[in-house]
Amino acid sequence: MPDENSIDISERAETVLRGLISRYIEDGTPVGSRTLSKEPGLALSPATIRNVMADLEECGLIEAPHTSAGRVPTQAGYRLFINKMLRVEPVKKRSIDLLEHRLSSSVDEKALLTSASEMLSQMTSFAGIVSVPSKKHVHIRQIEFLKISQQRVIAILITDDGQVQNKLLNTHREYGDSELVEAANFFNAEYAAKTLEGVKADLLKHLQSDHQSMHREMRTAIKIAGSLFDDDNDGEAVLVSGENNLLSIPDFAELEKLKQLFDTFKTKQVLFDLLQKSLATGGVNIFIGEESGYKPFRECSVISAPYEIDSERVGVLGIIGPTRMNYDEVVSTVDITAKLLGSALTANSQNL
């Protein structure tokens, strides 16, 4: 595959390539020289366009699918177009207002993330994806222990981001109600306002030490809370919305392509890994086809952007669609959604 960064083409060739890609994105059919010659602003004869297209094909920027007389952009052609010719269109004010309203009506972090993913899907007609922030740096607000049977306790953990987590714990012995209250009081006095990551590390250290040196409330709290954080995970790492939109896109007509794509949506690990790449680099990222490094996305483009809480980059959102898409519109939609989601999450955390 040619390195599009090393390809140097003339201004006329750029104009033809831009016109061809724009026409192909709009129609989805191979573009011929006669069709391009009718594009407004091109002002080139079909013969001249044919010669330029031959040069573009030799550079690996366009190709002829099957026996068609027309040409379509290659992955390298799309990349050159995006790097050098993309004209990002601002998102319409009506869409921004709708997005802000939807996010402002979401009551907690999970609802905000879900709304952002759903709105991205609706605005682009592709699949919307968003990674869930890691809970490692979330601070604990309060914990409660409630007895429900002889050796079963429900732990209720409230974090400073407004999330409430309930977990059923099987204990090795029966605890009285007063013991559980005392244990919760000790835990809250000791660990309130500390991060989940710090608490887990401290509990592990205590669990490995001599329990006899602890007073009763501390031993109870450590044992029960240790069970709460044991094998704890951050829940669903990636939220996906609107994947069914892809069923109606002709570019995904082959069932095998769709099956691989939907299997990826189901397992989500690949999605999470891909979004993590964007988290590390920042800004809007565009992965075209094989650039993502994952086989299921070889016919797709993934456009993503990180979002922030209190100026800290904590997650990534984006869309998955065909390589034949209106990049100028989708890029700005992903970018503004990431910014508005970050603002909404920051406001939500400050209001708790």
Image: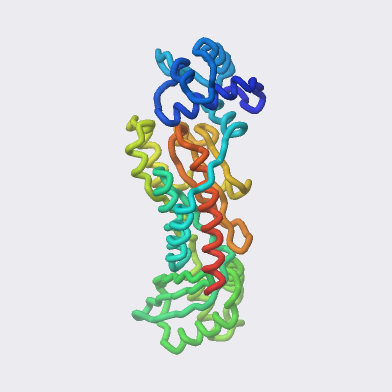
Choose between 236 and 51: the one closer to the eye: 51
Question: In the orientation shown, which residue stands out farthest toward the bottom?
Answer: 178
Choose between 316 and 226: the one closer to the eye: 316
Tell me which colouring the rendered structure shows.
Answer: rainbow
Choose between 224 and 110: the one closer to the eye: 110
Report the side of 209 relative to 327 (left or right): right
The x and y percentages for residue 120 are 44, 50
The x and y percentages for residue 37 are 48, 18
In this view of the protein, can residue 191 be seen by the observer?
Answer: yes
- From this view, report whether residue 237 is shown above or below residue 71: below
- Image quarter for residue 85? top right
- Image quarter for residue 212? bottom right
- From this view, report whether residue 96 is shown above or below residue 346: above
In this view of the protein, can residue 275 be seen by the observer?
Answer: no
Q: Which residue is painted at 52% across and 13% down in the image?
A: 45
Q: Which residue is painted at 48% across and 54% down in the image?
A: 96
The x and y percentages for residue 143 are 49, 78
Choose between 29 and 226: the one closer to the eye: 29
Picture mark count: 0
Q: Which residue is painted at 43% across and 60% down in the image?
A: 102
The x and y percentages for residue 56 are 56, 18
Report the side of 91 relative to 59 (left or right): left
The quadrant in which the N terminus is found is top right
Q: Which residue is painted at 50% across and 36% down in the image?
A: 294
